[in-house]
Amino acid sequence: MLRHSIMETPAGPFTLVVADSGAVRAAGFTTNVPGLISLIHPALVETTEPADDVGPAQAAVRAYFAGDLTALDTIAVEQRTGGEFMGHAWQVMREIKPGNPVTYSHYAELSGRPAAIRAAAAACARNAVALIVPCHRVLRTDGSLGGYRWGLPVKSWLLEHESAG
């Protein structure tokens, strides 16, 4: 069973989809729960029901927005993909520190494949657990924002929040 909760944040509504184990399977700045669930790997999709509180992940998101920029670091995440690189790249993404965004090329290098800039960008694009797996901390090579599934105003807000912390 998966549980989901929509919470208000300074960056906009944020939805968490959490497994019984407490691991986050999807998260994003949206109220569209079916759309968010569609981002989860089919092998990880289960029946989903709303909940007022989905546990430690929700408390960590609140703490993050209250200024504890490391609150999300220990939240368990479950994502799957068809290849080894993507899973490894998501782990590496979680190691990018708040206030220290990196470029796609540097992210590819950190992920162990410096020439795989497009694969690094794909890891960002296919990330189903926004904020907790911080794809917002990856920028274009020229330092501009690039894309973000939840909109550039949200990405910009998150980066400003983290640089102020």
Image (cartoon, helix red, strand yellow):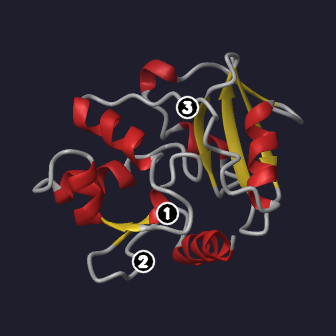
User: Is mark 2 in CB contact (under 8 Å) with mark 3?
Assistant: no
Q: Secondary structure at mark 2?
A: loop
The label shown at residue 95 is: none
Query: Where residue 125 sits in the image (x, y, percent)?
Result: 37, 54
Graded by Cα atoms within 10 Å as few (under 14), some (14 to 19) or many (20 or more), the crowding at tag 3 reads many
> In front here: 60 or 2?
60
Looking at the rendered structure, the secondary structure element under dot 1 is helix
Name the N-terminal-most of marks 2 and 3: 3
What residue does disc 1 label? 136
Query: At which x and y percent is residue 96?
Result: 45, 55
Q: Is residue 78 above or below residue 141?
A: above
To which quarter of the image does residue 112 belong?
top left
The x and y percentages for residue 89 are 32, 43
Is the Cβ of the residue at disc 1 closer than 8 Å to that at disc 3? no
Above or below 142: residue 124: above
Position of the N terminus, as image quadrant, is: top right
Residues packed near mark 2 inside 10 Å, few (<14), some (14 to 19) or many (20 plus)? some
Left or right: 15 with respect to 93?
Answer: right
Q: Is residue 2 left or right of residue 130?
A: right
Residue named by callout 2: 145
Query: Quarter of the image holding residue 3?
Result: top right
Spatial CA distance of label 2 from label 3 is 25 Å
Residue visible at 31% across and 74% down in the picture: 140
At x 38%, y 54%, the residue is 124
Q: Sequence-wise, which precedes: disc 2 or disc 1?
A: 1
Question: What amino acid type should be assigned to the residue bearing mark 1?
Answer: His
Name the residue nearer the viewer: 81 or 96: 96
Q: As drawn, which residue projects farthest toward the right?
A: 52
Residue to which mark 3 is pinned:
77
Q: Which residue occupies 64% across, 75% down?
A: 157
Residue type (three-letter) at the residue carrying disc 2: Leu
Q: CA distance from mark 1 to mark 3?
A: 17 Å
